[in-house]
Amino acid sequence: MLKYVARRILQMIPVFFGVTVILFILRAPGVLPGDPIEMLTGDRVISEVTYNQLVQKHGLDQPLYVQYVTYMKNLFKGDLGLSYKKNRSVTEIFVEKYPYTLRLALAAILIEMIVGLSVGIISAVKRYSFWDVAVTLSTSILVSLPVFWLGMLMQVLFGIYFKRWGLPYLPISGMGNPPDLAHLIMPAITLASVSTAYVARIMRSQMIDVSQQDYIRTAEAKGLKGGAVVRKHALKNALIPVVTFIGIDLGAMLAGAILTETVFNWPGIGYEIYLAITARDWPIVTGGVVIVVIAYMIINLLVDVSYAFLDPRIRYGGEAA
Amino acid sequence: MVSFPKERGCELSNRFRSIIAVVLAVAMLATFAALGGCTTSEEKADEGGEGAVKGGTLSQFIVEPFAITPTLAYESEGIYIVSAMFDSLVEYDPITSELQPAAAESWSPNEDASVWTFNLRQGAKFHNGREVKAEDFKYAWERMLDPAMASEISYHLLAVKGATEMLEGQATELEGVKALDDYTLEVTLAEPYPDFELVVGHPCLGPLPKEAVDADPKFDENLIGNGPFKMAEPWVHDQYVKLVRFDDYYGDEPYVDGLEFKIFKDAETAFLEFEAGNLDFTEVPSGRLADVTAKYGEAPDGYTSNPGEQVLVGPELGIYYANINNTKAPFDNPKVREAINLAINRQAISDALFDGSRKPADSISPEGILGYEAGMWPQSRYDVEAAKAALADAGYPDGEGFPTIKLLFNTGSYHDQVWQLVQADLKAIGIESELDSAEWAVYKDKLKKKEFDIARYGWVYDYPIMENALYALFYSESADNQSYYVSEEFDAQVLKARSTLDLQERLAGMREADKILGKDMPVAPIMFYSHFDLTSDRVNDFVYSPMNIPDYVHCWISESTE
């Protein structure tokens, strides 16, 4: 197992270099249109002197490979460079914002797991019941709703109308100062909405699938009670595809959630990276992608490792089974 | 027209005038107290005509600024904050844009307006308690020109002698600026420039305390200024900037205790917060002017809001226009440009997108600018028949033989809709065109490389003077001349007008220059920008100037009724 984990970590190194090289190729003149320095001053044309000063300040007068080497050297010191557009240290930006993204992502994943899994299990166990139909119907609706629309709907209902009606209401946007739970509720539900519906559906179909397996019949034949069969035998096996899905989803959320962040004015990294791409603010783009890639690889590893615990047939590291 | 006396002394008549206007507005409001329904009229009625109450925090929607320091702030978000925290030598009247004393009590030019002497107010303090001295202006200006700062707004100071040398790294000191003593600042210009007094009114040209800048590597996010408000805490990125009243301020004491600039990504979310009662000053979401106005009432003058008269749509000093590539055939033919000008139905664009709140542009100079005269671009109007005639004159009857052209604009905002309408207008006179919607990066690139036929362009004035657009946009050597228009006649006229000492003669000279443009029609003006904002029903006497600077000192907040 340890050997497997070590090998996986070693595999991250070429991926990491590959990603940074590609990101630097994108910077090369002529690859993508647009000069990041020209774009800084809005409609106004930047003066030549200021242009040259900024080019020097950001080291853009150096050949690209020199820029790459410098970037890599600084990266290992934890310095991700200076944003063109924001005039701030990129490390500082992500150190400040990544915890916010993490907070929102974990809250959403929690909702996804608790609500998605339990709803999925209930509708599988009580197949074709009223609840099953209700779940199928509501998940279909949820999946097809645009996220921003759902978010704004909740804002208007729970933020504005509840306040007017004198009911307990939720804050519309931001994280709160200091950050609190009330501000987290609506963004987390919004971000989790579509995935929760998917998790419920995958869980339901997996449970149904697993319940037709031989080992479930064996368990039932042994005289185990229905609840124990579901808990001990069906659930663990049915979880594998769901865990895979949640892992991928968490990875995606760790790259930020542009729509949810925009609607709820959540200071996460998704919108930050999106803006940086449109502004060709390469230090933020590169720094952001590096962080996201690392996070994604770690999550992937954790998901793969978790399989071994869920399904005894899966073993890592030893002789091939 | 307003005349500018050369020596100003403690001229406060403008301020008194605005106070009287405020008092009158309050009195009128008290009469119609039933209208607003949310503020209590007894607060206003008495108190010797003042009526305003102290206290409260005014909250305002902004997007994350690039910078909030005067050395670097170049967009309106940053300038809101700079203007609340810093006082420049002079300031503009919030409505008329007339000059008023600020950090300088009085000032005067020499006989050819090449040397300016500013007499600073004594006893005015920085937020750290130290007195503001002439040296502090010199330091702040030198910091703006320091190559290491690479400030995008160093162009404000280019008229000062030695500024270019400093910017290019050949000098470490700004030769033209001298602190003769603690309270006298002498500024020598590279050449005579009678409008320089208006340039120094820019909010970013205030003083900086060197010792504080040196002591704090994060000074630019935790500023110390000399204005009516000071920072309550350092800038919290993507969340807020909080300011509180500075009690030792030399000028009128603000009524509000503080200002909170709440940072949003999106105006729609900000508007929801506004409707929930959590925001005092925000934008009207696009396409909603009619219902928002019906609900909150319109400010009569477009700039001053009060409960029940909360929507601000006054014209700004800025213009949206079709930038025509003058270097490219067939647009090098003035008749073609004339036809394009005549073809655009400006009112329809304003009606469709802004509920008619934006004024169709009948010239490049907006109405609020000093020296404005109507009808300087006679062909900047909608007349399909005249447009067809002009196109025929140019050798393209009914558009025959005219190439299919591209209309370039940056994606997003409302540009798509504007250019669809322009496309239809051009088609009506026989010009076929394609929409070339590009992301910002590509748009900027194409403009620079002259790879466009007609492109969206916008201009917002830095100073309330006609020259600020005329010279910047059309002088042949100016970097901002993106239509690549070249006219010796215009160049000579604008340069001559620029250095004319007498104000009225100077303005007349600028109008002459504008008329030359009106004859050549290098671009097609579309509409003047206007405010599209509103305040909450607890904000009173809030003035939002045509230059997009709110008067945070004289507004006040009535007790919330909730």
Image (spheres, coloured by chain):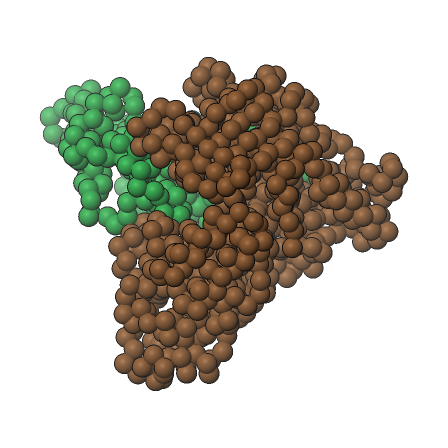
Compared across the picture, whether A202 is left or right of B509 comes to: left
- Chain B, colour shown: brown
- Tell me the residue at 45%/22% (across/down): B218
Does B375 appear above or below B279?
below
Which residue is drawn at the image coordinates 65% and 20% (left, top)?
B123
Indicate the quadrant where residue B398 lies: bottom left
The number of discs equals 0
Quarter occupied by the C terminus of chain A? top left
- Is the residue B233 above or below the residue A277 in the image? above
Q: Residue at x 85, y 40 (%)?
A: B49
Viewer-nearest residue: B232 or B69: B69
Q: From the rendered image, report the letter of the chain displayed in green.
A: A
Q: Return the x and y of residue B105 as percentages of the image width and height.
A: 64, 31
Which residue is found at the position 36% from the left and 50% from the top?
Answer: B478
Viewer-side residue, A254 vs A66: A66
> The N terminus of chain A appears in which quarter of the rendering?
top left
Residue B135 shows in this picture: yes
- For this orientation, the residue located farthest to the bottom is B397
Q: Position of residue B77 (x, y in %)?
A: 51, 40
In the rendered view, would you say A178 is above or below B32? above
Residue sitting nearer the eye, B347 or B441: B347
Where residue B367 sits in the image (x, y, percent)? 58, 59
Which image quadrant for residue B321?
A: bottom left
